Image (spheres, coloured by chain):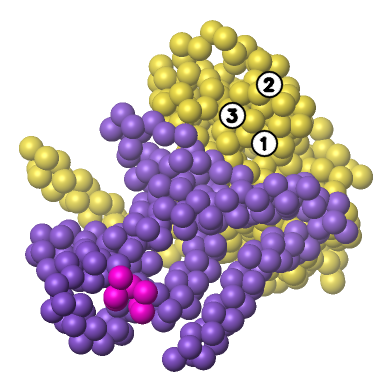
Amino acid sequence: MKLRKILVGTAAVAVAVALSACGAPGSATSGGSTSTAAAGAGPYDLPVVESPSFEAGTTMAKLAEAGTMKIGTKFDQPLFGLRGLDGKPVGFDAAIGSLVASKLGIPFDKIEWTETVSANREPFLQSGQVDAVIATYTINDKRKQVVDFAGPYFVAGQSVLVLEGNTEITGPQDLSGKPVCSVEGSTPAANIVEKYGAVLQPTDVYSKCLDPLKNGQVVAMTTDNVILSGFVDQNPGVFKLVGDTFTEEPYGIGLTKDDTAMRTFVNETLQAAFDDGTWARLFEQTAGTVLPVPTPPTINQY
Amino acid sequence: MVIFDNLPLYFEAFLQTLSLLLLTTLFALPLGTVIAAMRISPIGSLRATATVYTEILRNTPLVLVFIFCFVVLPILGVVLPFMFSAVLALTLYTAPFFAEAIRSGINGVPVGQAEAARSVGMTFGQTVTLVVLPQAIRSVIPPIINVMIALTKNTSIAGGFFIFELFNSGRRLVNDNGDQVIAVLVGVAIFYLLITIPLGQLADYLERRVVIKR
């Protein structure tokens, strides 16, 4: 039986590969419609602006001229940026990246995705290794000293995940002195230690927290609600979120410092997407499979 | 300057890295010695056991050993404190390296020494502990310190497994200080060098002494 399943699976993959090989050279994934620019293209069905015009010398003009852009995102963040089998990230961050690129006349398959983790987001922007960072990147003042932020395009909030049967912990205030798992070097991990006195059991990826939580080695894990919701969804009946979100994490698009024209352009792009419903559609298609669609945040044009 | 502002945090992590190094050495060095003795013993089953253990652990990525201790053991019902599991994983992984370093030293002792010891009626245990090892240990000190230097850097794997060591202090500070990422990471490197450079110096020193004694 098992062998047959494998055979069927292999056959299905083979057919999929054969089909996608037949597609037009411009179509990025098998899900996208064939690439007539007006009808929208790529996995997020975004119309690519034909030969957009920008003031000469701006970053937008350079990127539009090059016909490609480098976007840094996370490759391990379910719902936001999770690298798929084809090597392209899938999620809301990737969708927002495609949106910005499409307004520059760059189709989805011309975007060069680079993995950015917490430690290399600022250096990559400063050295120009990426043109933008869209990587669940919380806007804060220290970061603003070295990079610029467009957006926010989403506001997450920190929450606490415990085992389904746990009645003792009802929020972050119950975590003082208790072992709590989170990813070291993330803002929520710092918060739970500094504001609530939890004992941090640090790790490098969020999924590693699940086993110790099941084994009782930690009593809770904490990070942004959007990530925790993904785990609740993947493990029905095992985990639950407790309490309300207790921070605001505005996710922004990291851009090169002092490139005001580019920041204004990205902000306008986001605002237009908020207004015409594209933003909500992209959210529904990605993170919205688990989370309710929120109202768009207010752009902070500083 | 971010390094000086966060010295207490660096120091806390530095101590954790240091204790991982010392605890692991404390357990892995004796274990490695036993494995080395097993590999040269006249008893075939001991030799085979030690060889299989050495080859499997030495040729497996350390991360896999960590995953075994932190994920597989709890599934099998063995739930250990994090620090215990980390030292266990590092010990299991490092002991074969110590063993191979010691075995190379043992092989460097002329075989006539062991033959002479056996011919005057010493047991295998006496031969190893009284005749061979004391001569071997001199030439194995530099490679043992090499293994310890590698171990120092390997402790950073524990940072992915719930231990707040140097590597994690770097990640925490990077997040808090997005404007000074490079300085933070240079700080982490300096603290590693604080352990590894003195170890290297010690190896040089001991090596010179060994040369003089011959």
Q: Position of residue B124 (x, y in %)?
A: 18, 67
Q: Position of residue B175 (x, y in %)?
A: 73, 48
Q: Which residue is mark 3?
A: A180
Q: Decide whether the magenta segment is chiefly helix, strand or loop.
A: helix
Q: Which residue is mark 2?
A: A176
Q: Which residue is mark 1?
A: A189
Cα distance in 3D space between marks 3 and 1: 9 Å
Q: Are marks 2 and 3 in contact (CB under 8 Å)?
A: no
Q: Is residue A280 visible?
A: no
Quarter of the image with the N terminus of chain B is: bottom right
The residue lying at 74 percent from left, 42 percent from top is A138
Q: Colour of chain B?
A: purple
**Quadrant assignment, res A227:** top right
Label 2: few (<14), some (14–19) or many (≥20) C-alpha neighbours in 10 Å: some
Chain ID at mark 2: A
Q: Is residue B134 magenta?
A: yes
Q: Determine whether the residue tagged by mark 2 lies in a helix, strand or loop.
A: loop
Q: Are marks 1 and 2 on the same chain?
A: yes
The magenta region covers B130-136
The residue lying at 44 percent from left, 91 percent from top is B214
Q: Are marks 3 and 1 on the same chain?
A: yes
Three-letter code for the amino acid on which mark 1 is drawn: Ala
The residue lying at 64 percent from left, 73 percent from top is B197
Q: Determine whether the residue tagged by mark 3 lies in a helix, strand or loop.
A: strand
On the picture, is A270 further left or further right than A289?
Answer: right
The residue lying at 37 percent from left, 58 percent from top is B30
Q: Is residue A108 magenta?
A: no
Does label 1 or label 2 sit earlier along the sequence? 2
Residue in front for this viewpoint, B45 or A214: B45
